[in-house]
Amino acid sequence: MSTEMMFWFIPFAAVVALLFAWHFFRELMKHDEGTDTMKKIALHVRKGAMSYLKQQYKIVTIVFVIMAIFFAILAYVFHLQNEWVPFAFLTGGFFSGLAGFLGMKTATYASARTANAARNSLNAGLRVAFRAGAVMGLVVVGLALLDISVWYIILDTFVDEADAKHKMIMITTTMLTFGMGASLQALFARVGGGIYTKAADVGADLVGKVEAGIPEDDPRNPATIADNVGDNVGDVAGMGADLYESYVGSILATAALGAAAFYTTGTADMQLKAVFAPMLIAALGIILSIIGIFLVRTKEGATMKQLLGSLGLGVNVSSILIAIGTFGIMYLLQIPNWQYISFAVVIGLIVGTVIGQGTEYYTSHAYKPTQNIAKSAETGPATVIISGIGTGMISTAISVGAIVVGIILSYLFAAKFDITNLSAGLYGVGIAAVGMLSTLGITLATDAYGPIADNAGGNAEMSKLGPEVRKRTDALDALGNTTAATGKGFAIGSAALTALALLASYIEEIKIGLLRVGQTTIEVGGQVIQTAEATIMDFMTYYEVHLMNPKVLVGIFLGSVMTFVFAGLTMNAVGRAAQKMVEEVRRQFREIKGILTGEGEPDYERCVEISTKGAQREMIFPSAVAVIMPIIVGIVLGVSGVMGLLVGGLASGFVLAVFMANSGGAWDNAKKYVEEGNFGGKGSDVHKATVVGDTVGDPFKDTSGPSLNILIKLMTMVSIVMAGLTGVYSLL
Amino acid sequence: MSTEMMFWFIPFAAVVALLFAWHFFRELMKHDEGTDTMKKIALHVRKGAMSYLKQQYKIVTIVFVIMAIFFAILAYVFHLQNEWVPFAFLTGGFFSGLAGFLGMKTATYASARTANAARNSLNAGLRVAFRAGAVMGLVVVGLALLDISVWYIILDTFVDEADAKHKMIMITTTMLTFGMGASLQALFARVGGGIYTKAADVGADLVGKVEAGIPEDDPRNPATIADNVGDNVGDVAGMGADLYESYVGSILATAALGAAAFYTTGTADMQLKAVFAPMLIAALGIILSIIGIFLVRTKEGATMKQLLGSLGLGVNVSSILIAIGTFGIMYLLQIPNWQYISFAVVIGLIVGTVIGQGTEYYTSHAYKPTQNIAKSAETGPATVIISGIGTGMISTAISVGAIVVGIILSYLFAAKFDITNLSAGLYGVGIAAVGMLSTLGITLATDAYGPIADNAGGNAEMSKLGPEVRKRTDALDALGNTTAATGKGFAIGSAALTALALLASYIEEIKIGLLRVGQTTIEVGGQVIQTAEATIMDFMTYYEVHLMNPKVLVGIFLGSVMTFVFAGLTMNAVGRAAQKMVEEVRRQFREIKGILTGEGEPDYERCVEISTKGAQREMIFPSAVAVIMPIIVGIVLGVSGVMGLLVGGLASGFVLAVFMANSGGAWDNAKKYVEEGNFGGKGSDVHKATVVGDTVGDPFKDTSGPSLNILIKLMTMVSIVMAGLTGVYSLL
């Protein structure tokens, strides 16, 4: 089969994904939303979620327009940038936003339907929730590959360059920049969504559970709708945008690395194969993810372990099929060293699995670490916090260890065990990232399933459905908590690998930047080299990107401190926004008569509005810092400083994100462990101490931790897009 | 004046420091310890502290003997190391241990005497406590410079090498390894001491304050003596060993960098001057610190601000005199570019001051950040933790920013604004570190003052001295809390600069290692270069220490995760040891009759023993990790991996340490702010919420945070000492 013909498998898979998403959505809508109360509550949540998204997209549109104009000026006035960038940037953002919108819309339609289906059977509930989640998963991967395919066709048609190999470099480096649009969209979705959901959650808990003594999801609590909306905007739209960015970023970075790897040493066809390989792996992953989705089912009265097994079956079968299929498709493609490249994909899949298992070990109350945190609650909230932080910090060893081993192995395989073969090795690391993310269609379905089940539980509680139904929705909800924790681990790990691949492709952008301003040669170690033919190693020497260069060292320090400051800003943002929510709920309890006896109707909209406004206001500053910092460092310190910044930010941010996500997850489940009757059970002092841990964990695991994923990718993306400016001109 | 003659100023200053330390100690002992109860309590604390130190030194001795044998085998059997290393290693450890012992002994003699002096006047109390602290400060700097002087004389006499410049390289790289002894001693002092003090503190608080409702430092609490002992072993001996290491490390690293900088381009005399310069700056600092010590005095009824002013006067006058004196001494030395080098010293002094001020802003309740944390307690302990963590994370920007600017400026000055002049620039960074630490004689006095005043307060409380005396000791104690917080900031900042200087000198050790195994040439970019004449830049190219090398990247990831795991291990260690303390105190309350009515005598010794054993047991694993990790990475990944590890560990560890120290300090003072009557005052729910923050902050600021200082220096030191093995042989 010719390489060009194989290309068409990529848009084909994208369309298949979107068709199945449409199919699952249609199937979902055939289900009934249940009683009038259920419908009413679902409507409240849906309206709240949409009003948030509307507000969010308004701001995002303004920012995107400004940025697009800025890029256009750089491109058309100063010729410091590719003229396609403004448009690529906009489509990246548009498709990411569209995926979030569709995914969230589906999720808000699904919660009441899941609760209603759970009135029939556990399996019915699981299927409705999971397939609604699958809509999100398939829309994300489908739109991503569609965007990639269309842009490839456009650029292949319109880029005016005689040399085929150089043309491919220009195509791939241009495509990379539309990751910037996805990245910026993801920033607002994750940071804004993260602040929204936790402001509502913490606010609702502090007044409702602690002060008024009413249970979670109680309709008398004015913040409860905002809390349910938050699950959708944070965990569905936010998570989706985050992984959309990783997915697109890893594929495009690997394509760019592939184009570079075969630029000087291979034929044009070999180069083309290397560019298509990551896209084909992703396309294969889509088809096999859909098969996995159909495997997810359960039986009545299933235990937690059996439920986990049901989801696990789907994901694991998909993974194994992808591992096998990769060898087939790489063989068909006849990519050079196809066996080695295929192994890199397998390594990526294994790394993803290890991170998932490790995260489960450290955050599930089936294991010692979380049980110990629960036990430490016997001496009060302070020791809960100490042991939760200690355990979360220690837990980072697993995820980072898995990534480190994955980097080394995928590099060595792709470089055919020649560690000096930088371009092939780094391509292998990119391929591993793509491999890890190739199951995204189904793994994102399990992620999005979580908040849907959570909302279904909330709906059942508020609608006062029978205990049998509550038991089923509780089981579905508990399952969602576990998948949420492992999903976060997966999101962070894939973000780290993606950022690394992006970092490697940054050099390619620098090269194009130099060529654009007419610098056709560079001097390396006394020798004059053609810029177009310079290797990564040459650029490392040219820009002195070594560890004793003060610009590199300072960059690394700045990258490291950036992640802490960013995490701190988002933590405090949640604290402030939650404070406002607390005041509003207290006001309603005070001013609206009969609210606690159930006779007065709380003003849900007001709480939704407060969370929305709080999130929008609080997300501006950290977001601005994330975008501006790489530009400033680039202008002052140049390429070596930027690379230091990115590596420092990646190394610290990755570890910090894992720590925060795992501590948060462990606190959450330590509380659940006590609620199951251990160490005194619900209502005891031990329980109260674990509630403190859980509340602290909320912004850890749902705001700051996940936002760091975006930070490390976005800083790299900004650097890539600005490479034409900062790679060519700098102060020091 | 000849350069050789100027050398004698260094041992002279060391002896002057020790004589004044002796003088202050004699002066202290002339004071009376007060009433019989006061004497009895002081005796309890002194015995507890000494029994801890005895236990500690036993373990340390075993570890040192094993390590010395290991180094001896490497040196004499495999010839992979300098034959002086085993001895240099032992003296470094011995002098550091001696300084800790003398400082702590003085501190335990001083507490009752301070309380007794406070019965006369505030000024008398301040003077006794501060001059006792000065004993520690002067013993540390005196012994450090003495050790350096003696070794210089020995090596200068016995190193058998005809070429004067090469001989100097060998002397300085050998001396560097005795920092390893200081480093290992510091590890045990900081980690063991940190676990001890917080196990006792947290344990005493949890049962005493929270469960039994008795005040702090109440003699009925069996853990109260252990708590007071902990202040001495953690904050005196631990802090002293930490800064001894930084002091020695920065001077020796800078000397090694100086020897390298003038090896190829300068004369032997220029090289000698560059080696002596950091030592002379330190010697000058000693003399001028002593002048500053004599300036510290106050008047009756002084406000907190006035008390801070009294200490600040001493430190600031010393700093300004050193800044001026440096220009004089560098002029006399006629070191090349003496004005530029002198500016690097000034930059170091300014950086130290900025870090101190920044730390004060973020941790003192005179300012908004800490007040906001106190306010967040209105919604319970969870929001206190959230806002404390958020604020601590944001606060890292100041310290890291100051260090970053300091690095850039000191580099640029010393390199005469030629950023490519690596060896001169890095020498300048080392000089800035030495400049920052040149005031150590007096800054360490203010640090050691804190726990002495704290213990004096405890003694006064337990001895039931009158309210007027309590008010004075409270004022002295509160002053100590502030100096402790800024002292920690200073310790971390200086550790970061020192680690950076050590990192730069690592290359020199690699060079010597290569020469030792007979590799006299290296190939760099196709050219053959004499190993002895290779520059830092050559080695960067030779070992491919650039940011796209997977070994470097993996090393950086590992360094980053190491710091989190290390912090997590020490956090959990405190949690476990505190748990044991809680159980023991509960047992005593239960089994010893009349303990709460004051009729029964608590078993203080048992609590001291539990803290001691807990600390000794818990410090082993994290310490072993810190020592072994750089060796494993060196053997597997080689020089580029090690440098990645060190830079990753430094960048993450520095920021993490600042975050933990500042969060901890801010929580402590937020509690104090409430206790002063804000937001409901003592005993209110708000107060209880801030107590949770304070308890969480204890291991943050006194165990994990400070231990990270050691980690980042020790990993570098281990790499330096093992350079002969890992620099020459590695797997990948």
Image (cartoon, coloured by chain):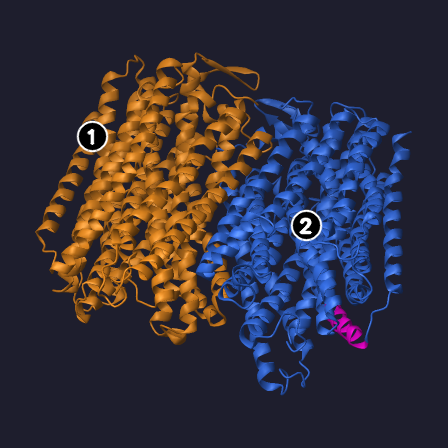
Chain colours: A blue, B orange
Labels 2 and 1 within one chain: no
Residue B272 located within the stretch drawn in magenta: no
* Image quadrant in which you'd find residue A665: bottom right
The image position of residue A655, as x and y in percent, is 56, 45
Q: Disc number at residue A487?
A: 2
Q: Which residue is mark 1?
A: B6
Residue B125 drawn above or below residue B98: below
- Local crowd size for mark 2, using a 10 Å CA cut-off: few (<14), some (14–19), many (≥20): many
Give whichever of B499, A108 is nearer the camera.
Answer: A108
Side (left or right) of B730 relative to B291: right
- The chain ID associated with circle 1 is B
Give whichever of B8, B451 is nearer the camera.
Answer: B451
Q: Residue furthest left?
A: B30
Observer able to see residue B156: yes
Alpha carbon of mark 2 to alpha carbon of mark 1: how far? 65 Å
The image position of residue B214, as x and y in percent, is 31, 67
Q: Disc number at residue A142?
A: none
Observer able to see residue B273: no
Side (left or right) of B389 relative to A249: left
Residue at position x 69%, y 67% in the image: A228
Side (left or right) of A208 relative to A30: left
Q: Amino acid at mark 1?
A: Met
Label 2 SS: helix
Residue at position x 71%, y 73% in the image: A462
- The chain ID associated with circle 2 is A
* Image quadrant in which you'd find residue B601: bottom left
Stretch in magenta: A36-50
Label 1 SS: helix
Give whichever of B284, A430 is nearer the camera.
Answer: A430
